[in-house]
Image (spheres, grey):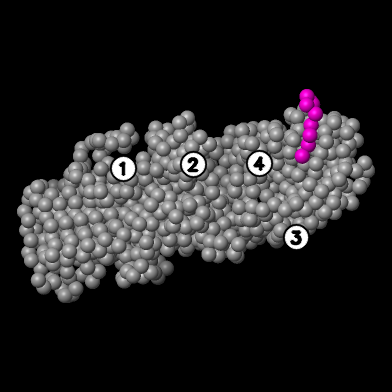
Amino acid sequence: VSFPFFIKATSLHSHWTFHPNFNRIFCCPDKEPGLQPWMPGHSEDHRVTISYGRKVLLTSSATVHSIEILNGGKLVVADTNRPILLRTKHILIGNNGELHIGSPDCPYKGNLTIALFGSDQEHSYFGRKYIGVGTGGTLEIHGAKKLSWTFLNKTLQPGESNQRNYLFQRSWGNRGIIVHIIDPKTGEVLNDDRFDTYRSKDESRRLAKYVDAVESGLILAMVVNDEGSNNLEDSAKKTLSRLGSKHITGTKASSEARSSRVFHSSYGEHFTASISIDILSNSSILELEDQPDGWGPGDRVVVASTDYSMHQAEEFTLLPCPTCTPNQVKVQGKAQFIHLGEEVDGVDMRAEVGLLSRNILLHGEMEPGCYGNEACKFFDFDTFGGHLKVERGFRAVHISGMELQHMGQQTMGHYPIHFHMNGDVDERGGYDPPTFVRDVSIHHSFSRCITIHGSNGLLVRDVVGYDMLGHCFFTEDGPEERNTFDHCLGLMVRAGTLLPSDRDSKMCRDITDGAYPGYVPNPRQDCSATSTFWIANPNNNLINCAAAGSEETGFWFIFHHVPTGPSEGLYSPGHTEHKPMGQFFNNRAHSNYRAGMILDNGVKTTKANDKDKRPFLSLIGARYGPHQDADPFKPRVPALIHHFVAYKNQDHGAWLRGGDVCGGTFPDDDGSHQQVKNSLFVGESDNHGMPLPDTPIWGPGGSDLTGRTLPRGVDFPMRGMQIYDGPINVQNCTFRKYTAMEGRHTSAFGFRLNNTWQSCPNNNVTDITFEHITSRVFFGEPGPWFNKMQMDGDKTMIFHDVDGSVSEYPGAFLVKADNWLLRHPDCIDVPDWKAAICSGRYAQIYVQTRNPANLNMDIVRNEYPDRPLTLEGALGKRKHYQQFQPVIVLAKGYTIHWDQLAPAEVTIWLINFNKNDWIDVGICYPQGTTFTVISDIHNRLTKQTRKTGVFMRTTQREKINHSHQARGYYYWEEDTGLLFLKVKAHNDREQFAFCSVKGCERVKITAIIPKGSPPSNCMAQAYPRHAELPVVDVPMPRKIPKARLVRSVCVCVCVCVCVK
C-alpha cells in the first residue's frame, strides 16, 4: 500500500530569543549591593581610573581611552538585554583591582564586546592594546556555557547536506502537487512528476491514475505547492483518501516544512520515513555526536578537514531549525569539501566541529592592511591585534565562555592569552580555586592561542583555536610543568615570524636576526616546526585533544637542555630530557603537513658563535630518556602514549625518538627501548578525499586502484611501520590495506628512506596481523624516493621476526638481500621484499676513525670475500671523526679496508655484544706501520673511561684467540697488510642495552704510518688466503603451518608511526 504525505511549504519569518535565568541572583556579580551605575559615554581621550574602593557597574556601551582598576577598585559589567560594546586602548587590573563579567555560578547571559584599539603609548610590561592582570589583580570572565566542540556523526558531502535530498525543480512553477515515488529499502527516488491541479481538472484525473498505478510497498510522497489543493477534482480526492492521508502539516517561524509517517514492513517491523521541503535551499544539516548545548542561530562554527590539507576546514553560520533533532544543526551554505562523519577501516576519522561564537567577545580593532613592522614582509594584513597578559602574583584569574578574535601580535610576549612567569597557579601556589581557561574560542588571530610561560598547574579545557599564526597551544621556555590541556581543539595553524620554530622556509631564509655572520639557513632543519601543541617540558598533560591541521606538526614534544629567556636557571642542565611524561591519552592528529606527532629535537640554548652560527632557539638534536625524578641514575619511567589516532598526515603519523636511540653517535639512555603495542595501521583507507583544482596530488591507490588524494607523489612508497635505529618492539599490531602497485612500493613494514644511520638487530616484531596486504615488507631498491640506496643505513637494515608472524619463520631475521655480512647458505630469498630470511646471532660494531675522518670503509666477511660492504660513514665528511656502524654475525672473521690511507686512530665499539661474544677482525694498514692497542670501558652516563687491558704483539696468529681482558694479542701480517685481533665482550649486558652493565667495551688502535704510503686496501692480498667456507651456525627455523597464521584484530590506536 502506498502512503502519501502532504506538506505545504510556506516562506515565513523566523526569530530567536534568550530567556535569562535569574534563579541565582545572589551569585551574580552585577547584583552585588553597593555597585554604582557607570555610563562613561564615548570619548577616546577619557582616561578612567577606578580605585580606592570604588565599585562600578557598566550598564551601557562606552568608548574610553583606557581603564585602570587598582587599590580596591572593582568594575562589573551589567548583564542586560541590550548588547554592550566597550571600546578602549587597554584595561589594566592592578594591585587589589577587580574586573568581573559573570561568575561560574551565574554565567553572563547578555552580549558583550570588548574592543581594543590603537597602537600608541606602550606600557613597559604589558605593551599596547591589552587587558593586563598585574600583581594582586583579579579577572573573572564567565560567559554562557556552550558545547565547545564535538564530532560530525554523519559524513557531510560537498554541495549537499548529509541527508537524502530531492531537488525542487523551480522550472515547474509555484503551483500544483509534486509527487515522488521512493524505494523504502534504498531511499532512491524511482519516479517523480508534477500535477498542476489548480489550472486543470484533467491534471487531477491524471494524478488519480498516476497514484492508482503505484505498486504496493513503495512510498509515495506529495508536496503541495501554493493553491495546489484548491481545485482538486473528486476522483483525485477519493484516491488520496483511500491511501489514508488526512493531515496537512507545516511549521511556523521556519523556512522548512516536514512530515513523517510510521510504516509497517512486510517483516513485521516498524520504521519512520520523513520528507522535508526547505525554501532556503542553500543550507546543510550537520549531524553531531553531542547535543550542541548553547548553540543558536547566528553562531559560527568550523568543520575540520579530514583530508591531507588543513585548508579544507570550512566555516559556517547556524540557521534556525525547529525541525532538527537534538543532535542536528542547520548551517548556511553547502560544503565545498568532504568532511567525514564516521569510522573508516577501524579508524575514527570524524571531522571535528568547533564553536567559534561566544556571547562575550574580546577582539582587536584592525587596520585594513599590514603596517609598521617586519611581519609586513610576509603578511598583507594587519597583525597587530589585542592581547591578554597575566603577571606573576595575580590574585585570581578564571576565564570561561569567551571568544577572542583578532588577538595576538607578531611581537614577542603579546598573545591572545598569556600567563607570564606566574610559577604555580593551582593549589601549590595558593590558588583556590585553581586558575583555569575553559570554554573559550580563539580564532582569526595573529600570534598563538594560549601561551604558558614559566607557569605551572594551569587548566586549559574545552578551548578551540582556529586560524592563527605560530604555535597554538604553546609552552615556552622549558620549566612549565603540570599544566593540563583537556579536550582542546586546534586547527589551521599557520607559520609566524617570532621564533625559528614558528617560521616557514621563506621566513627562515629572510629572518636571520641573532645569527652569526656567514650563517646559511637550512629551513627544514633549523626552522619549519609550526605546531598546534608545542610542549617544551614532557611533564604536562594532554587529554582528549585534537590537532586537526597545521603547517607542520600536530603535537611536538621539544626539549630545552637548559631553560631559556626569563626562566634561565630554573632547572639543571638536561632536566627536561629526563623528566617523566605526564598523561598523553586519547588524542588525535590529522591534516598536518609534517607529522601528527613528534617526540624529538631540542632548541639551541646558546647564542650564535663562529662554531655554531645558527640563531638562538633554532632546532637542534636532543633525545628523551625519562627517569624517576628526572635523574638518569634512578630507574627509568616509561613514557606512555595511549589511544593516539593519527591519519592523513603527509610525512608521519608519529615520529618518536627517545630512550635508547642514539644521541649524536651513541645511546644517551642505554638500556631503554621503545614499544608500539596493540595498534592498528591503515595504509590507504576508504577516506579517498576528492579531486580539486589545487589538490597537489591525486592518483590511483588502494586495493581497487581508485582515485584518491596522496601524501606525496603518486609513486611515494607508503609504509606503516618505518623501522629506524632502535631498539624497538612492535607487538600485537594489525596492518591493513597496504597495496603496492607498479612503480609504487607500499608496504606494511619499511625503513627510513635515504638513511645514513644504523639499524639495530634487536628491533623485534611479534604477533603481527595483516589484512588486505600485498607486501608485508619492502627493503627498497634504487629508484624514485629510494634514490641510489647507497647510504649506510640503506645497506644495513635488519629486524627480528620473533614469532614468525611476518616471515612465517619463528625467530628468523629479515635482512637486506644483498648484504652478505648477514647471510648464510640457507637463507631464503624473498625477491618481492628485496629481502632474505635468515637465522643467526647478530650484533654490531661501531668503527670510529680519526686522522683522516673523510674516508670510506669496506668490510668483508671471510666466508664471502667477493661480497664486500662499502660504508661511507654516518656523520658526513666534514666531522673531525667518522663512524661506521655495520651489523655483523658473531663468531665470524672479517677484514676492513679503506679507500685512502688508513686512519691513524681506530676505535672499535662492541654494540649488542653479550658476555663472551666475539669476532675476529683484520684491519688493513701500509707496510712499516707500528701499533699501540689497548682496551677500555667508557661509561656514557658518567662520561668516565677506564683502561682495562693492553694488546701485545705476537708472531703466532693463533695466539690472538688466547686473549683475556687484561692482556690481549694482536698479529701483524705485514705481507698482506692486515692487523689481526679478536674483539670480545667480557661483561654482561642488560636486555635492551647497547653496551655492558659497566659501560661500552672498546678496542683502540693507534697507528704510526710511514709517510707517503699508498691507500690501504688489502683485499687482493687477503683473499683467497683468508677465505673461509660459509657455515650455518644457527639452523633455519621451520615454517609455520598456515593455520597458525590466523590472528585476531587488535585495538585501534594509531596509524602510520615512524619509530627511532
Label 3 is placed on what type of residue? Asp
Q: Please tell me which of labels 4 and 1 falls first in the chain.
A: 1
Q: Please tell me which of labels 2 and 1 falls first in the chain.
A: 1
Dot 3, how many residues are within 10 Å of its Cα: few (below 14), some (14-19), or many (20+)?
A: some
CB atoms at circles 2 and 3 under 8 Å apart?
no
Closest to the observer, 18 or 578: 578
Q: CA distance from mark 2 to mark 3?
A: 46 Å
Dot 2, how many residues are within 10 Å of its Cα: few (below 14), some (14-19), or many (20+)?
A: many
In magenta segment, residue 78: no
SS type, badge 2: loop
| Residue 85 screen position, x and y as percent | 13, 54
Identify the mark at residue 793; answer none if there is no mark: 4
Front tag of 2 and 3: 3
Q: Please tell me which of labels 2 and 4 falls first in the chain.
A: 2
Label 1 is placed on what type of residue? Gln
Write the residue at 55% across / 65% down.
628
| Residue 592 screen position, x and y as percent | 44, 46
Vertical relation: 901 (above or below) 138: above
Identify the mark at residue 711; answer none if there is no mark: 2
Quick one: which residue is furthest to the top in this view?
Answer: 1012
The residue that mark 3 highlights is 988
Label 2 is placed on what type of residue? Pro
SS type, badge 1: loop
Q: Is residue 53 left or right of residue 727?
A: left
Magenta stretch in the rendered image: 1006-1014
The residue that mark 1 highlights is 410
